[in-house]
Amino acid sequence: MCKEKDVCFSKEHYTKKQEISIIQLVNHIGEKFKVTKRVPEMSVSETKVFRSKQEAIKQFEDWLK
C-alpha cells in the first residue's frame, strides 16, 4: 500500500471499463513511477515505468482519455 510520502493514484474509467494506477517506487538509487492500465474483463494489463513524475502523470492522464 501507499505510505504517507508515496505518490499513489488510482482511477477507473467507467465507459472503457479499465483501471489505471500510478505508484512511486523508491530504492537506494532513486525513485521511479510505475503506471499500470488494467482491463479486468480481459485479464490484460500494460505497465510503463518512468523516472520523471511529470511523464508518469502525463501517461496516466492520456490513458484516462
Image (cartoon, grey):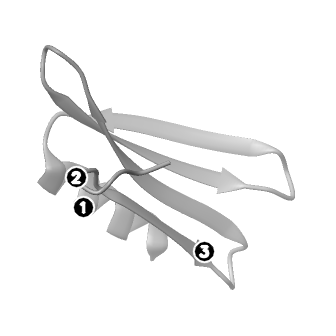
User: What separation in Å lies between label 3 and label 2 (alpha carbons)?
Assistant: 23 Å
For badge 2, the amino acid type reads Lys
User: Are the residues tagged 1 and 2 within 8 Å (C-beta)?
Assistant: no
42 or 34: nearer the viewer: 34
Residue 36 percent coordinates (x, y): 51, 47
25 or 11: nearer the viewer: 25
Local crowd size for mark 1, using a 10 Å CA cut-off: few (<14), some (14–19), many (≥20):
few
Work out whether 53 lies above or below 62: above
Local crowd size for mark 3, using a 10 Å CA cut-off: few (<14), some (14–19), many (≥20):
some
| Residue at the spot of label 2 | 5
- Residue at 80% from the left image edge and 56% from the top image edge: 40
- In this picture, residue 56 sits left or right of residue 12: left
Work out whether 10 lies above or below 54: below
| Residue at the spot of label 1 | 58
- In this picture, residue 44 sits left or right of residue 33: right
Depth-wise, is mark 1 or mark 2 nearer the camera? 2
- Residue at 45% from the left image edge and 77% from the top image edge: 65
Work out whether 55 lies above or below 27: below
For badge 1, the amino acid type reads Lys
For badge 3, the amino acid type reads Glu
- In this picture, residue 60 sits left or right of residue 17: left
Residue 47 percent coordinates (x, y): 50, 38
**Which secondary structure lies at badge 2?**
loop
For residue 33, which quarter of the picture? top left
For residue 12, which quarter of the picture? bottom right
**Which secondary structure lies at badge 3?**
strand
For residue 59, which quarter of the picture? bottom left
User: Are the residues tagged 1 and 3 within 8 Å (C-beta)?
Assistant: no
User: What separation in Å lies between label 1 and label 2 (alpha carbons)?
Assistant: 20 Å
| Residue at the spot of label 3 | 12
Residue at the farthest front position: 4
